[in-house]
Amino acid sequence: MPHPIRSLLKPRLDWLLVALPVVVGLELLRPEAHTWIFFTACAAIVPLAGWLGRATELLAERTGEGIGGMAEAPARVDP
C-alpha cells in the first residue's frame, strides 16, 4: 500500500479540476470576462484530457488492440 504522504507529493494535474466550478461561476457572474473564462477553461480541460487518455488506454487493454485503437483515434469525417 502506498504511503499517504508520498501520494500527496506525487506531481499531478488533478488539482486543476478546481477550475471547473470557477469557469461556471465566471460564466454566470461575469459573462463579459471572456479572457478569464477562456484561460480558466483551458486550465480545467487539462486534467479532463488526461482522464480521457487513461480511460481509452484501459479500454484498449480490455478490448484488444483494434477496438482500443479506434477509441484512441480521433473521429474522421470525409468531406
Image (cartoon, rainbow, N blue to C red):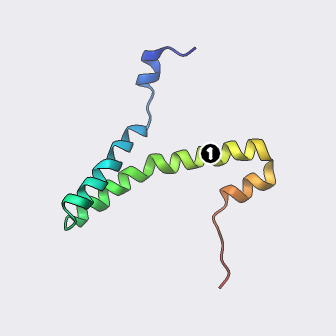
Asked if residue 60 is positioned above or below residue 32 in the image, the reply reads: above
> Circle 1 sits on which residue?
55
Quarter of the image for the N terminus: give it. top right
Residue 42 image point, x, y percent: 37, 56
Residue 43 image point, x, y percent: 36, 51
Secondary structure at numbered mark 1: helix
Q: Quadrant of residue 38?
A: bottom left
Task: Kindly identify the residue that appears in the image at 46 percent across and 18 percent down.
Answer: 6
Asked if residue 1 is positioned above or below residue 9 in the image, the reply reads: above
Task: Kindly identify the residue that appears in the image at 20 percent across and 64 percent down.
Answer: 33
Asked if residue 4 is positioned above or below residue 34 in the image, the reply reads: above
Local packing at callout 1 (Cα closer than 10 Å; few below 14, some 14-19, many 20+) is some
Residue 59 image point, x, y percent: 70, 46
Q: Quadrant of residue 79?
A: bottom right
Q: Is residue 55 left or right of residue 29?
A: right
Task: Kindly identify the residue that appears in the image at 67 percent across and 45 percent down.
Answer: 57
Q: Is residue 67 left or right of residue 35?
A: right
Q: Is residue 8 left or right of residue 51?
A: left
Q: Quadrant of residue 73?
A: bottom right
| Tally of marks | 1
Task: Kindly identify the residue that appears in the image at 33 percent across and 42 percent down.
Answer: 18
Asked if residue 35 is positioned above or below residue 47 in the image, the reply reads: below
The extreme bottom residue here reads: 79
Q: Amino acid at mark 1?
A: Ala
